Amino acid sequence: MYKVLQKYTKKHKHEQHGSGAGEANEHYSRSRSEGSHLNGAGGRGLSPPAATNGYYSASREQHKTNGGIHHSGSQQQLRRTEEFHERSRSRGGDYRNGYSGRFGAENGSLPRGAVTERRNFYDAATGAHGFSENSSWETREHFERKVQKGGQKAAAGTLGSRARLDQWGSGSGLAIERVHDSSILQRERETSSPEPSFSSEARTTTSARDALLAWARRVISTYHPEVDVQNFSSNWRNGFAFVAILHYFRPEVVNWEKVLQLSARERLQFAFDTFESEYGIAKLLDPEDVCDVETPDERSLITYVSMLHNRLVNEPKGGYDDVISRLTRGIGITNEKLDHLLVRIDNVNVAEERGERFEILERQVREIVDDLHLLKPPIDELFSDVEILRQQRHSQTADLNKQVVGLEQRRAAYLGRLEDGIMTRLGIRPKAQFVTERVTSTTTADGGSLAYKGNAFRRVEDAIQWIRDRTYKLNTMQFSETLEMLEQMFEKQKLDNRDIQDFRQTVDECIARQAEVSAEDSYDYFELLKILESEYQQLRELSAGRMVDLDSLIAFIRAAQLELVWIHEREELEVTRNWSTVQQLDIPMLQNYFKQLLHEIELHEKQFNDVHNQGAALINQRHPAGEVIEVYLRTMQNQWDWLLNLSKCLEGHLRDAYNAKSFLEESDQIEQQMQQQLNHLDQSYNRTDFSLDEGERMLRELDSIREHIQQLHARLLSLSERCSQISPLWQRGERIGRPIPVVSLCEYKSDECTLLDNHDLLHWRIRGMDGVEASIPSVVFRIPPPDPRLSNLLSRFHGQFERLRKLWDRKHHLTRYNMVLSTMRTVRGWDLDTFLSIPPDQRDEIIKALNEDVNKLLAELDPNDPLARRLKDELRLTNEHFYDLLGRAQKGPEPNYANEFDAAAVELIRKFEDAFKQLSERAQIRIPSNLEELEHQIREHKIFEDNLQ
């Protein structure tokens, strides 16, 4: 159970984790996982996810055409990036979730807000570079302007421009005039897709509008009759036509059963969203513009359908399943071959360490190098298949391109490892330069290699080698977890990027030396220049991207460290707080602090989530430092959870401290009140001779005291209940003599553990239920009740209360006893005249009340109590005297002195005998050792002596 706060100690381990990861990356060729680290495009080192569209899409919108870069302008760029960050914040930043943007048979739900920005091929391959909101925009725009200029030069020097599909969506004022007859008819003539084609007569006689309508009718001719279209207005209102066109080209994203259940507006919304997310076709129409009017605007519909035609005319029916299947199969086979080659390379290293003969090592190395060169053509074929998907903007292009680029990078890395390592150590000369192997695979007529034809070729080869070295360095860049190291890397990357930008002069010199090449070698030289320009352009983009990657990573880590510092400051207060001295704790201050802490956490949560979402967005954008970012995200989340758990611990300990302190305060009050009542009873109710009025007053006071005693008893019972819920906080500060059970206050609430050692006040040695021992902050645990000190205190209070109750009973009995005796003495003091002066009814009430009081008091006293025996005798004498007076009052006065004397003598003798007997019995009783009983016997003996007198 020590998992309760195992994650608390994990926060110190991410530094070691970072160093370990760097070691593993240095030896990337030692295992399959390290080899596959190269599979991320652009050297990002992250496996592509299944979904191509994440919650955080790319923030740049560029279009790469024939090696050129189309830049849309810094203001438009900034606006799109701000919109991206707004979407990122609104979506919550869960980088583990994705959004497919499809209405498939799996979920059957329409996409909501699925806006996917169009990206160029390089951005699709690398996941696009995302920016944090505090990135350096000036640096980024500077790099992109330089990349743009270089790309424009390369495009102007080598390849022509290609018509862009998004020209149709450049403005809201699209007109039907943009649908030229020649453009549509020419597309129909050039298309080789399996969709139905126009007849030659139709191509020569129909207008652009009719040709477009004919194309739409042919595409959807096999669907339900409701899908039939005869015009560009009312036939499109129900949305079936748009969904049918989508289903024709992408059947896997349409579930017709669910489409039929949708309303016309929902069908139109689904079609427009999917065309935009899958093909990048801008939404020129809103569903209500089509379905909520009797006759939709024909010009708007023609414009939108024209955009669909231009984008889909070369799209094969049913997608590119064969191409994707071939790519998947080829990638798997090539990966297996590279795995096998990696094992062979490791075996050669082992053989070299073992001291194998040079000839054997050379043969094995050359065989491996030859096999690596033989993998180049299959990988080029895979690139060709990816290019087919890229031209059609297929949704899986980015993922497949990453995998193919990863294969090429693995192959190049293995070649570099052999040539820079084993072959250099053994002095083995390579047969062909790895950096120009795409060109050196073609030999001249005399069998010589192009790499050795002259200085011009060597200069180009050296330039390509320099570019590839820099590319490999950027692709294998290891990102540190420390902010200081990252800032140093950023400054170094600035210098490297300047060198890369300045290398443009070397590339231009290679182009200028084309005139030095002979006619028969000009084609090979031109192909080599194409490789040089293409790879240099990619290097510029990659370098600029790494600058942005470092800048965004630094911004995130700086913000993340501020959050961790904020959490650590509050964590330190709670971990080091001493709860063992309750009397020294300022409970009201702690209660206010607890409320303030919860308020601070609530207010700070938004800022924390913003930073967390910033890191999650970088991961969704395939940031190459994804592992570092994930470490920080995990650490942030763990520390945030730890802070929330500490707030729970603070609440629990604060509750115990408040209960314990209030318990002690109330117990002190109860003890003082009981002692006051004891003193009052002992001092104020010792009189034996008082009048009836005084006796009645004393009884009323005793009744009031009894009510107070009952209240004290109720408070004692309440303390007993509260004591069973109070943790013994004082035990936290005293060394335990044996293991005791403790309970977790957070995370795994109520889990029971065993406290083994608490000599350290802040960290306890704990054994969990699974037997695992660990040192965990003591604030996490609560020693379960009851508190033995409070239990002993309660026992003492109950004993004191029992003495108070008995004392009250005794004082109450004595007061009533003395009142009854006084009343009986008064009655026995009546003579016949006094008796006759009292009305008969009143006399009867007096004697009746007296007997009732005496009998009630006798019932409460012990029968063997001397007070009870005396009370009986006194009552008997009183009754005899009363009834004697009553008889005399009825008979008249006839005194008989002899009889009276005899009776008095007999009575006196009887009393003496009773007194002697009582004195004899008391003389035989052992003197008690208890002070209270001794005082009781003394008082009884005093009463005995008084009675004799």
Image (tube, rainbow, N blue to C red):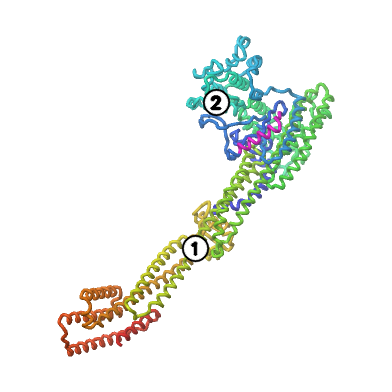
Quadrant in the rendering for residue 188: top right
The residue at 15%/82% (across/down) is 891
Is residue 481 visible in the rendered image? The answer is yes
Nearer the observer, 741 or 406: 741
* Number of numbered discs on residues: 2
Q: Earlier in the sequence, mark 1 or mark 2?
A: 2
Q: Quadrant of the C terminus?
A: bottom left
Relative to residue 744, is residue 801 drawn left or right? left
Say if the magenta span includes residue 71: yes
The reply to whether residue 126 is in sight is no
Amino acid at circle 1:
Ser
Residue 301 occupies quadrant: top right
Q: Where does residue 173 sit, x and y in percent of width and height?
A: 64, 22
User: Which contiguous range is marked in magenta?
Assistant: 70-88
Q: The residue tagged with tag 2: helix, strand or loop?
A: helix
Instruction: Examine the residues drawn in magenta and state their main secondary structure.
Output: helix
Q: What amino acid is labelled 2 in the image?
A: Pro
Please tell me which residue lies in front, 36 or 875. Answer: 875
Q: Say if the magenta span includes residue 444.
A: no
**Tag on residue 662?**
1
708 left or right, relative to 764 = left
Q: Say left or right for 365 vs 744.
A: right
| Residue 658 image point, x, y percent | 51, 60
Residue at image mark 2: 287
- Measuring from the top left, give residue 917's x and y in whole percent: 27, 86
Q: Nearer the viewer, residue 165 or 836?
A: 836
Q: Residue at x 67, y 36 (%)?
A: 129
